Image (cartoon, rainbow, N blue to C red):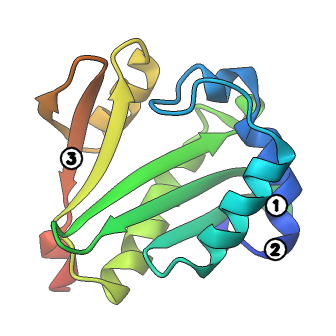
Amino acid sequence: MNIRLAKKSDMLMLYNWFNQIDSIKNKLITKKKISKEEHIFWYENSLKNENRFIWIIEEETLAIGQIRFDIDEDEKLCFIDIYIEKKYRNKKYGKEAIFCARNYISKKRRLKYLVALVLKSNMNSFNFFSSMGFIKYKTGLEFYDLRLNIEKNNEE
C-alpha cells in the first residue's frame, strides 16, 4: 500500500467516490450527490489550496481510496477525511494511509491535532479512529470531534 498526492487526472475518480451512497450517508456537511460542475470547481480549487492535501491510496497501482487533510493554521489543526472502496475496507489500508499522511504533514507543518469529525450514526468510523488512538474531544449535536495529538510527531 502507498499513497500519492492527487493530480488533475484523478478528478473523475474522486467525483465517483464522493457520490457513492456509502460515502454520502456518512458526510457531515454534504448530504446529497453533487454535480460534476460543482466537483470540478471544488477539485480545481483544492489542488491550488496550500492548506489542503489530497492523497490517493493505492494497492500496487490500483487506486482504492482517498485521504484528505484540511489544515487550520491558526488553531494548528488538521481535519481528516478518508474514503476507501467497500471491498478494501477492514484490511488496514486506512490506518496505513493515515500513518503515511500524518508523517508527511508533520514534516511540512507544525500541528497539534489530527481531527476526525464523525457522525454519531457512523459507529464503524468512530471505532476505526478510536482504534488509532483518537480520543473524543467533544460531542456536537450530530457528530463526535475525535482528536489525535501529533504535536510530539512534529519534534521527531
How many numbered markers are drawn? 3
Query: Can you identify the residue that label 1 sits on?
Result: 11
Residue 30 percent across, percent down from the top left: 56, 32
Q: In which quarter of the image is the N terminus?
A: bottom right
**Between marks 2 and 1, how big is the CA–CA gap?**
6 Å
User: Image point 67% across, 24% down: which residue?
Assistant: 32
Q: Can residue 60 be seen in this view?
A: no
Mark 2 Cα shell of 10 Å, populated few (<14), some (14-19), many (≥20): few
42 to the left or right of 61: left
Left/right of residue 129 with respect to residue 60 in the rendered view: left
**Could you give the CA–CA distance between mark 2 and mark 3, rounded to whole angstroms?**
30 Å
Find numbered disc 2 in the image and state the secondary structure of the residue it sits on: helix
Q: Give the residue at mark 3.
A: 147
Q: Nearer the viewer, mark 1 or mark 3?
A: 1
Q: Which mark is residue 60?
A: none
Determine the residue located farthest toward the top in the rendered image: 121
Contact flag, marks 2 and 1 (Cβ < 8 Å): yes
Horizontal arrangement in the rendering, residue 131 relative to residue 140 (left or right): right
**Secondary structure found at label 3:** strand
Distance CA(mark 1)–CA(mark 3): 29 Å
Residue 97 appears at what percent x and percent y? Answer: 53, 58
Q: Position of residue 49 (x, y in %)?
A: 53, 77
The residue under label 1 is which amino acid type?
Met
Question: Can you tell which mark lies on residue 8?
Answer: 2
Give the amino acid type for the residue marked by disc 3 in the picture.
Arg
Tell us which disc is closer to us: 2 or 3.
2
Find residue 21 and report its image quarter: top right
